[in-house]
């Protein structure tokens, strides 16, 4: 199928070939900008619900790798954990978008994330070559955590074995990257007392992106991006800066709260761009990295972003491509 009618004197085959070439060459400035850069990709459980999506995701990661970027995958698996908890008859609830994790539930979380989901992602990537190495956030003390305290209606609530990342030791991950591998990391961490903690995968990805000095954090989920006034209004917010995001945070709920907090922390921690994209769209990752329009919601720091793009002939379409700005918090709920 061709994207435009053939010009006079041009065959449909020629028109199709020209379109393909134009699509490829559109990637050139982005290839040059992100060559050799570390990109942390958070793969959410809702974006891995079909075999087709998982296979396409692995292809996108390998494409980034061959294109000269250094992808690091940090994955969740919330729906997969919930399904296993159901199967073994352990109840679980969520508070502020986080799973209340009993000791019993923690065993299941660890088994599903590190033993099942991690293995599957590694296996799919390695269909293309010996690239992916799976690790848990516990390995080599990559992620250390302490028990997280959450405030609910002005009171501190105990949500069990949920970890707040206190420290990231990225050496083992950097070593894998330097060895030409693609690290695939599950969001489980250990605390000083030796206890194992369940870390929200958005939070884990953000902490790793900061510690690795990543150029981008990209989170795949099951919506187009951040909606202005969910669920009443599903108008996509394409771009927002950290001040706009700070103002918006108190109005956010469920899964989007940890996600947007994670974006904020990443950008505050020096990552120039953090994105929420629709993981249900095959290869949305490639559309985000390699096309001028991008997709989803981008949180960016203008100064860091300009520095990231410096040295590329002053061509800054990425700062202009997300034209819509965020509403103020008063407009959102
Ligand atoms: N403002 C919002 N914009 C978009 N999605 C929202 C918003 N508020 C809550 N959500 C919910 O957040 C979900 C994504 O978070 P989550 O289920 O934790 O995904 P993942 O498993 O990918 O981390 C969406 O499916 C949607 O139901
Ligand atoms: C504390 C907490 O909520 N941990 C998450 C970890 C997995 C995760 O974050 O998975 P998604 O990215 O698919 O949501 C959980 O138990 O579901």
Image: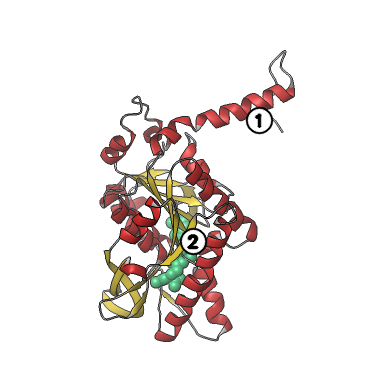
Question: How many C-alpha atoms fall within 10 Å of the one at disc 2: few (<14), some, or many (≥20)?
Answer: many
Residue 52, given in percent of the width and then of the height, sits at: 64, 56
Q: Nearer the viewer, residue 206 or 168?
A: 168
Residue at image x 36%, y 58%?
173
Disc number at residue 3? 1
Corner quadrant of residue 51: bottom right
- CB atoms of marks 2 and 1 within 8 Å: no
Residue 333, given in percent of the width and then of the height, sits at: 39, 57
Residue 182, given in percent of the width and then of the height, sits at: 45, 54
Confirm or reject: label 2 Cβ below 8 Å from ligand 1: yes
Residue at image x 51%, y 50%?
61
Residue at image x 34%, y 61%?
172
Disc number at residue 13? none
Residue at image x 33%, y 48%?
328
Does residue 250 appear in the picture of this structure? no
Q: Nearer the viewer, residue 298 or 17?
A: 17
Confirm or reject: label 1 Cβ below 8 Å from ligand 1: no
Which residue is disc 2 drawn over? Answer: 44
């Amino acid at each position: 199928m061709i994207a435009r009618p053939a010009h006079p004197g041009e065959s449909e085959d020629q028109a199709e070939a020209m379109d393909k070439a134009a699509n490829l060459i559109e990637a050139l400035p982005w290839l040059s900008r992100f060559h050799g850069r570390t990109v942390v990709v958070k793969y959410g459980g809702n974006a891995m619900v079909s075999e087709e999506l998982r296979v396409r995701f692995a292809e996108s990661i390998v494409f980034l790798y061959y294109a000269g970027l250094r992808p690091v995958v940090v994955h969740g698996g919330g729906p997969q954990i919930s399904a296993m908890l159901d199967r073994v008859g352990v109840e679980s609830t969520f508070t502020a978008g986080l799973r209340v994790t009993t000791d019993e539930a923690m065993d299941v979380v660890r088994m599903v994330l590190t033993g099942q989901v991690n293995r599957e992602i590694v296996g799919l990537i390695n269909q293309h070559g010996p690239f992916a190495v799976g690790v848990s956030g516990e390995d080599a003390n990559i992620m250390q955590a302490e028990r997280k305290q959450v405030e609910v209606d002005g009171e501190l609530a105990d949500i069990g074995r949920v970890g707040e990342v206190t420290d990231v030791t990225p050496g083992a991950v950097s070593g894998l990257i330097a060895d030409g591998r693609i690290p695939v990391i599950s969001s489980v961490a250990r605390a000083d007392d030796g206890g194992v903690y369940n870390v929200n995968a958005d939070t884990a990805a953000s902490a790793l992106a900061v510690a690795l000095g990543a150029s981008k954090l990209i989170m795949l989920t099951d919506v187009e991006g951040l909606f202005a006034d969910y669920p009443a209004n599903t108008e996509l917010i394409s771009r927002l800066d950290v001040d706009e995001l700070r103002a918006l945070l108190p109005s956010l709920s469920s899964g989007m709260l940890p996600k947007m907090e994670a974006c904020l922390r990443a950008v505050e921690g020096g990552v120039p761009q953090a994105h929420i994209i629709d993981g249900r769209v095959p290869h949305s990752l490639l559309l985000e990295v390699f096309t001028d329009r991008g997709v989803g919601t981008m949180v960016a720091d203008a100064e860091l972003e300009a520095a990231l793009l410096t040295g590329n002939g002053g061509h800054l379409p990425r700062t202009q491509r997300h034209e819509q700005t965020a509403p103020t918090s008063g407009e959102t709920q």
